[in-house]
Amino acid sequence: MRGVKNKRKNTRSAVWEDITATLDVSDPSATKGRGKMIVKGRVKDIGAQGMFFVSADVVPMDAKADIVIDFNPEQPGNLILAAEGKTIRKDAEGVGIRFTRIDLRRLQQCITARMNRS
């Protein structure tokens, strides 16, 4: 039997377990007036092209999301990264999100600052 081929073109790296994220998600299947929802959870892994978001809440597929990632939840507002993305994959644990807008320089700053803090 051959190994399973990884379809991902870009790597993602596991992150610290306390990194949180908040999604402001538009639900493409929602009826008028109920098209937005706020979902809180944690980031399992992240890379330049996307991230995996873990949450007990149901996140709709093919939904646009405004994302706020907190790399230092012990000191809120200290290491924040804002991004935009779209949910592209779902499993029992959470959803995969492809970034449509992200400041890669800020992502690098947040990761480096967090590494230096540890």
Image: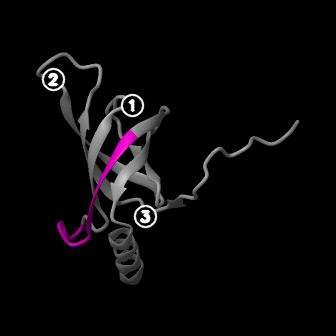
Helix, strand or loop status at disc 3? loop
1, 9: nearer the viewer: 9
Disc 1 to disc 3: CB gap under 8 Å: no
**Residue at 36% from the left image edge and 73% from the top image edge:** 105
Q: Amino acid at mark 2?
A: Arg
Vertical placement of 43 versus 70: above or below? above
Where 58 falls versus 82 (above or below)? Answer: above
Residue at x 20%, y 71% (from the top left corner) = 75
What label does residue 34 carry, if any?
2
State how far apart marks 1 and 3 are (Cα): 27 Å
Identify the residue at the far front of this view. 100
Mark 2 surroundings within 10 Å by alpha-carbon count, few (fewer than 14), some (14 through 19), many (20 or more): few
Start and end of the magenta stretch? Answer: 74-86
Badge 2 or badge 1: first in the primary sequence: 2
Q: Residue furthest right?
A: 1
Give how far across and how far down residue 64 sits, in percent. 31, 38
Q: Are marks 2 and 1 in contact (CB under 8 Å)?
A: no
Identify residue type, mark 1: Asp
Q: Amino acid at mark 3?
A: Trp
